[in-house]
Amino acid sequence: MKIRITILSLLAMLTVAVQAQTKDVTTLAEGQGVWMPKPEVTVDKKTKKKVCIWRDTENNSWHEDIGMIDNVPVAKDFKFPESRTFGSNDPFVPMPWKLTEENDETILHCYFQMPADIVKNMWLASNETAILDMETGITYRARRTVPEACYSKVFSIKGKEGDVVDLQIVFPKMIESTKRIQIYGVPNWYMRGLHATLHGGDLSFPGYDQKPIVHEPHKVSDANNYNKDDHKSWAVFDDAHLIKPVEDGTYAIWQTPEATYLAEACEMNWNREYFGRGGNTILLDQSGRQYKCKDVMFYPNDDLFWNEGLSGDYFAVFYIFEPLPLRLENITLVVPEGEPFAMWGANWDGKVQQLNIRELKNNQRFFEYTPRKVMK
């Protein structure tokens, strides 16, 4: 009887211990992450297992490769962003993440769905991995990983195709006042200064927008045998979509299932000024996928054109791109340099500018049509 009572007591203590370990889990932040291009999958002739090599660390030869790890945590019943089910024929591997507080530590859960039974050359974290509190300047350094053996090591995962792996990075517990953070040193999840908002911030990704309402400019004259070196052949517009003054380089974005609309603020330094772009403008996501500019609302696509108004006017040009997935956090605008053309002060410079999707959505309010007010 004493032995039975002792066993029951131990079981009760174990149950209490397990409950103590699992009851205090608080989600601090989460993100849908990037969708990585799916690595090429081959079949091992001997084992018949599907095998792939992770792209980002394919040539990470300067770190020790510890070989296969087969005890990686699996997140069962994991829900992917946009309620989407990923299959073997999908060209992307989603890379969501979640930041939690568990047992007086902060844990970054890094998820991905196994595209094969064996994934080689993975990388998770090292002494460069950290969370920065943007307000206090406190840096929380990574303590360890789960599995622990893969800290600062290249490793391979042995599992089952389709399983969602839950790799974990453990940090010290952050102070309660922490609101805004940046995450560094998790390259496979593109956390190289990734921004996140904690404790009650809006962590969900915005949904689709309505197509922007744009004031259609008046076409004064069509292009006449367009020639970039003959300004008299360029189309002329006036009565543009005027907006209130904004900072240089201000953009806004609207995402619909059919297209992405990117608005650019343009400043009039003269009463008559030419505008245009060098062609082949694209948006580039963190996985390297390109989204082409298909058209420009109401203005010529690629060609130079004149806009007439008043010096000091600000107006908007709306570019139409291929639709962006909702899960993107950042996007890079790439505008190639245009060919030289004959015009005084000719300037058709290219640019590369990284843009935050959430900020671009918030900027929509800056692009409402606002008729000019003139005092004489």
Image (cartoon, rainbow, N blue to C red):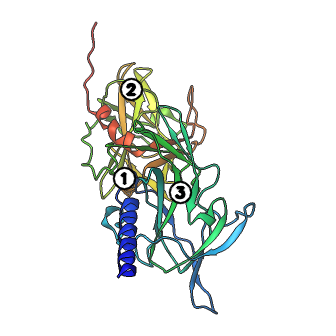
Q: What element carries label 2?
A: loop
Of the residues under marks 3 and 1, which one precedes in the sequence? 1
Residue 90, above or below 177: below
Q: Is mark 1 on a helix, strand or loop?
A: strand
The spot of residue 215 in percent (x, y) is 25, 36
Q: Which of 334 and 141 is in front in this view?
A: 141
The residue at 34%/72% (across/down) is 77
The residue at 63%/60% (across/down) is 151
The spot of residue 56 in percent (x, y) is 61, 62
Mark 2, other Cα within 10 Å: few <14 / some 14–19 / many ≥20 = some
Quadrant (top left/top right/bottom left/bottom right) for the C terminus: top left
Residue marked by disc 3: 169
* Residue type marked 1: Thr
Of the residues under marks 1 and 2, which one precedes in the sequence? 1
Residue marked by disc 2: 246
Q: How far apart are marks 1 and 2 (CA)?
A: 37 Å
The residue at 34%/55% (across/down) is 259
Report the mark closest to the observer, 1 or 2.
1
Q: Nearer the viewer, residue 37 or 323?
A: 37
The spot of residue 171 in percent (x, y) is 53, 50
* Residue type marked 3: Ile
Which of the 4 quarters of the picture holds residue 374?
A: top left
Q: Distance between the residues labelled 3 and 2?
A: 41 Å
The spot of residue 327 in percent (x, y) is 39, 56
Residue marked by disc 1: 27
Mark 3, other Cα within 10 Å: few <14 / some 14–19 / many ≥20 = many
Mark 1, other Cα within 10 Å: few <14 / some 14–19 / many ≥20 = some
* Residue type marked 2: Val
- Circle 1/circle 2 CB separation < 8 Å: no
Q: Nearer the viewer, residue 216 or 103?
A: 103
Quadrant (top left/top right/bottom left/bottom right) for the N terminus: bottom left
